[in-house]
Image: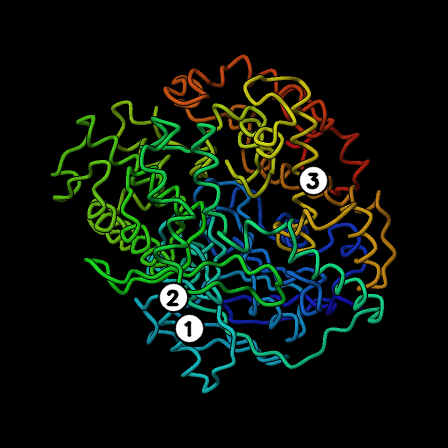
């Protein structure tokens, strides 16, 4: 095969046992790679109603067809499992060198099931796969784990994906990290911890062949130039923290647990401030000409020496959302999240919820074990991160995520628990972004900006962001299918504006690399197929229309300030847009897949609960 290696590695940690399955060409054309592969395999290999921490749950790592080639940003892999945070499909992306190494070892996909008897790590050395004792890695941070694994294997070039202490403790929003990148959302790290799997080390020496290297070189040279032009300028100069002042200006910057939509100290946490005071260098993932990763360091003060990379979502969640305007504290908080292996978005949203509970008198310092959890108290943020990552004291509750934590605390705190389907929300106040609000509500993995670019029509002015309309249903559908294609080709979303005609050009690239003729219509249908299969998985696991909802605060508490003042999503507006979305999808009014749609997409889903 070209582009693909043609092999799926199956690992059963309980036996332990390893086997290799050929990758069918039909799967390549219908599901492309990445998220498409992992969604199909998750549906096939995980029995219905499996508990996320049961050995039968699968943890699936899937590369895309461009990994291991010169295609810019073709360095992503998906991590997919049944999420312990939501109970539905949990898919996340990471990337860089580990992705390429998996491909060079000869595999397109790694499917991990079972549970090791003791803490272990997996070593994939081309065709030789072994399980190694990892007791010496117990309680080590992610950076420490990477170093120790390489020392154990006596090879500094081995690529390592691993979990931190939070994954071992099964914090429900623990992540999996590699090459300073993370598959951060939906708790894949907790599932990895439940399997007693601390790390996956990979060494590959094989070659990834492409069908037409001359055409690929010509195409990539042009794309590399575009990727260093105006289409990606904001990412190269300020990174995604460039969003802070933009969203603050239009009153979409969630502040103090979404109580406000503007932050009075936005200048102090802006991308511009970060660049001037804390950025030490800007780096790129492997095969990436954009270089958006801004590494920041604290040079003085109580957090001197803290260093990490900062993106907008981490900045929003641990900054304005917690009322924090002291940038060194945000850097320290992000550094701790990276070391422990917990998702920064979930972490910040949970802490902001704690702070509101504290200020409303719903919890006290006795509950928080002495932490004065007030908005703006950056020391409290640091203390709470330690507690939740270690599941220590009050952290035992916080490690469950904001949905389950609010249900335990009760006292009306559910009203301001900011999540959809249990997944904490990213940094766009959707009360004033009504297309995005629909996108967040229907997202298969929970409220998410990365699984639907539905905020873009709102922010760009393509639609009236304050008005709910039937037309938003198709806009969200098209956006989701578009993202499914990018996540299955496994390329960076920052590249999306570098194409004159996305579908035409990507179908051409796919054919040049794989030698498999793929038409524009087939590519589009693959995106739709993957979106529908995600939904079928969720229906199988108990989804109903009531799950496509929004936080109570978003639907009951209007934005109190800024140019979006008064904006809210009413129940009537959401119901109208849900009806429009289901109709655009060809689903039933209750959101179930129809037999006609399943046959049209050749889903091969044998589960009557998914059919209306």
Q: Are marks 2 and 1 in contact (CB under 8 Å)?
A: yes
Q: On the image, numbered disc 3 is attached to which residue?
A: 481
Image spot of residue 271 (x, y percent): 43, 48
Q: Tag 2, which secondary structure? A: helix
Specify the label residue 142 is tagged with: 2
544 relative to 278, above or below:
above
Q: Residue at x 63, y 30 (%)?
A: 457
152 relative to 361 in the view: left or right? right
Q: Nearer the viewer, residue 158 or 59?
A: 158
What is the distance, in whole Å, between disc 2 and disc 1 at their CAs? 6 Å
Image spot of residue 32 (x, y percent): 74, 54
Q: Tag 3, which secondary structure? A: helix
Q: On the image, numbered disc 1 is attached to which residue?
A: 146
560 relative to 217 in the view: left or right? left
Q: Residue at x 59, y 66 (%)?
A: 99
Image quarter hosting the C terminus: top right
Q: Residue at x 43, y 36 (%)?
A: 422
Q: Residue at x 70, y 47 (%)?
A: 485
- Furthest-bottom residue in view? 154
Q: Is residue 1 visible?
A: no
What is the distance, in whole Å, between disc 3 and disc 1 at their CAs? 35 Å
Image spot of residue 9 (x, y percent): 63, 68
């Amino acid at each position: 095969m070209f582009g693909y290696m043609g092999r799926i590695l199956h690992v059963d940690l309980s036996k332990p046992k390893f086997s290799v399955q050929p990758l069918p060409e039909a799967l390549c054309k219908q599901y492309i790679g990445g998220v498409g592969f992992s969604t199909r395999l998750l549906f096939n290999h995980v029995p219905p109603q499996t508990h996320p921490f049961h050995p039968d749950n699968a943890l699936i790592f899937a590369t895309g067809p461009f990994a291991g080639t010169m295609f810019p940003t073709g360095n992503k892999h998906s991590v997919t499992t049944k999420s312990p945070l939501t109970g539905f499909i949990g898919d996340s992306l990471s990337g860089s060198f580990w992705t390429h190494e998996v491909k060079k070892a000869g595999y397109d996909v790694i499917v991990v099931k079972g549970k090791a008897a003791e803490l272990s790590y997996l070593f994939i050395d081309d065709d030789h796969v072994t399980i190694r004792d990892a007791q010496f890695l117990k309680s080590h941070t992610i950076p420490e784990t990477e170093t120790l694994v390489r020392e154990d294997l006596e090879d500094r070039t081995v690529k390592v994906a691993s979990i931190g202490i939070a994954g071992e403790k099964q914090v429900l929003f623990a992540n999996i990290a590699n090459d300073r990148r993370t598959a951060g959302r939906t708790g894949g790290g907790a599932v990895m911890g439940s399997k007693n799997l601390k790390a996956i080390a990979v060494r590959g020496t094989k070659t990834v062949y492409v069908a037409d290297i001359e055409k690929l070189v010509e195409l990539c040279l042009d794309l590399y130039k575009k990727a260093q032009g105006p289409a990606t300028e904001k990412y190269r100069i300020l990174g995604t923290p460039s969003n802070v002042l933009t969203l603050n200006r239009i009153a979409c910057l969630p502040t103090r647990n979404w109580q406000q939509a503007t932050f009075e100290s936005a200048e102090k946490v802006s991308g511009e401030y970060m660049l001037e005071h804390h950025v030490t260098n800007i780096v790129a993932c492997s095969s990436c000409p954009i270089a958006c990763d801004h590494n920041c360091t604290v040079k003085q003060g109580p957090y001197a020496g803290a260093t990490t990379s900062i993106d907008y979502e981490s900045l929003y969640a641990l900054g304005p959302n917690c009322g924090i305007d002291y940038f060194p504290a945000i850097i320290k908080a992000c550094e701790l999240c990276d070391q422990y292996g917990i998702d920064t978005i979930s972490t910040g949203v949970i802490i902001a919820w704690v702070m509101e509970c504290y200020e409303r008198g719903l919890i006290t310092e006795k509950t928080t074990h002495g932490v004065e959890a007030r908005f703006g108290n950056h020391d409290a943020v640091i203390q709470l991160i330690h507690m939740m990552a270690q599941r220590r004291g009050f952290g035992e509750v916080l490690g469950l995520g904001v949905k389950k934590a609010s249900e335990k605390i009760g006292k009306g705190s559910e009203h301001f628990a900011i999540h959809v389907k249990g997944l904490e929300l990213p940094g766009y106040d959707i009360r004033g972004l009504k297309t995005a609000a629909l996108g967040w509500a229907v997202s298969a993995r929970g409220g998410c900006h990365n699984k639907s670019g539905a905020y873009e029509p709102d922010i760009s002015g393509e639609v009236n962001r304050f008005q709910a309309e039937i037309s938003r249903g198709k806009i969200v559908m098209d956006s989701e299918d578009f993202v499914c294609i990018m996540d299955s080709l496994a390329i960076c979303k920052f590249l999306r504006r570098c194409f004159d005609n996305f579908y035409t050009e990507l179908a051409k690239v796919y054919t040049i690399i794989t030698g498999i003729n793929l038409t524009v219509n087939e590519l589009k249908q693959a995106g739709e197929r993957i979106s529908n299969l995600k939904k079928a998985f969720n229906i199988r696991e108990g989804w109903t229309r009531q799950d496509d909802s929004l936080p109570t605060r978003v639907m009951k508490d209007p934005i109190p300030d800024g140019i979006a003042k008064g904006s809210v999503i009413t129940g009537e507006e959401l119901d109208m847009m849900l009806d429009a979305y289901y109709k655009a999808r060809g689903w039933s009014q209750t959101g179930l897949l129809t037999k006609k749609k399943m046959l049209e997409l050749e889903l091969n889903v044998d589960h009557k609960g998914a059919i209306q």
